[in-house]
Each structure stands twice: as C-alpha cells, then as structure tokens.
Amino acid sequence: MRNLFFVLLIGISPMLLNAKPSTTDNVPAELNNVKNQLMLVGKAKFSVLFWDIYDSALFSASGDYQAQNAYLFEITYLREISKADLIERTVEQWQHIGVPENAYAPYLEQLEQLWPNINKGDQLAMWFNGTSTAFYFNQKLQGQIDSPEFSEMFVNIWLSPQTSQPKLRKKLLGKR
C-alpha cells in the first residue's frame, strides 16, 4: 500500500542548503514550445492493483535520457492527490532510493510552494534545462529551483536503478 501514490515527484554542498526558487527569467512560460522540440524517450502508466494512478512520459532532444542534458518529465494524474500526500510520497521514494535527508530536506519548503493539490486529469511537468528545474502545472509555469543536483535527485525517483518501480523505469527509458 506504501506505493499506492508513488508520484512525480532524487554529499550535499552548502550551496544546496541555501537554494531558493529563482526568478523564472530563463525558463519558457509555455511548456508546449519546449515539448514540440523534443522526442519521446519512453512512457509508462503507474497502477496499483486495479487502480490507475498516473501516466508518465520522458522527453529529450535526442530521444535518449542523459541526466546532465535537458529533458522534460510529465505526469498526468488519473486520480486526485493532495499536495501533502504528493510531498510525503516523494520523500518516501527518496528514502527508498537512498537519498540522505540532508540532501532533500532543503527543497521541501520550495516544493510546498510550487506544487498544488492534484485533481484527476491534471498534469505536473518538470523541465530541466541543464542548470535548473522548472515545474509546470497544467502547462502553466509554477516556478523553478536553480540546482542541477535537485533535478537528478528528483527524476531518480523513477530512473534510478534502485527505484521502487523497475518496470516503470524500463518503459520510461524506452526499454521494453
């Protein structure tokens, strides 16, 4: 049951402890403009028993995933989930893949500010441009976190070899 709401939602430096949402001057306001220039890496549906929780998709310029290169990760929710549950499940997944608390704790307040409550049909997307992570809710920019380390830590919830969902990982990486 612990993975029921597995969601989007992976040494820390002193710089990360002071990371703050930045201005959004260097991210596109319209996510579709970015997505139109990318290729699908892979997509997957996350389900628990007979409940579909979300559809996810990973895009990059080359059609391959490289953590240091720009990519877009989208989740379209098929169920409601509160912001509190979204953050709680994210923390659980970081713990599952072995991210130390001092690495993710500095970002929790920012995620609380950036993420909304989710309704069925809503989409939460993450755009990593190589230096910062921008979050979009239903195609609208919510804000960004200026830290390449955050982006990798976050997407590793799904893409780390230690993920709690290895079949989903394979599909997102385009491996059947």
Image (spheres, rainbow, N blue to C red):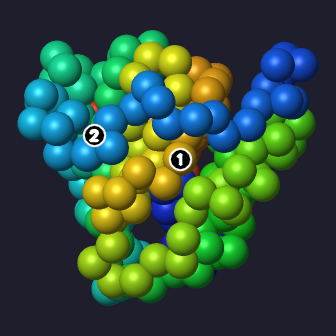
Q: Quadrant of residue 72?
A: top left
* Residue ID at (50%, 36%): 24
In the rendered image, which residue does mark 2 sit on? 58
Q: Amino acid at mark 2?
A: Leu
Q: Nearer the viewer, residue 131 or 171?
A: 131
Q: Nearer the viewer, residue 102 or 161?
A: 102
What's the mark number on residue 133?
none
Q: Amino acid at mark 1?
A: Gly
- The spot of residue 155 in percent (x, y) is 49, 38
Q: Is residue 153 above or below residue 149?
A: below
In this image, 146 relative to 121: left or right? right
SS for callout 1:
strand
Q: Nearer the viewer, residue 94 or 133?
A: 133
Q: Is residue 158 above or below residue 136?
A: above
- The spot of residue 157 in percent (x, y) is 54, 44
* Residue ID at (39%, 61%): 137
> Between marks 2 and 1, how big is the CA–CA gap?
20 Å
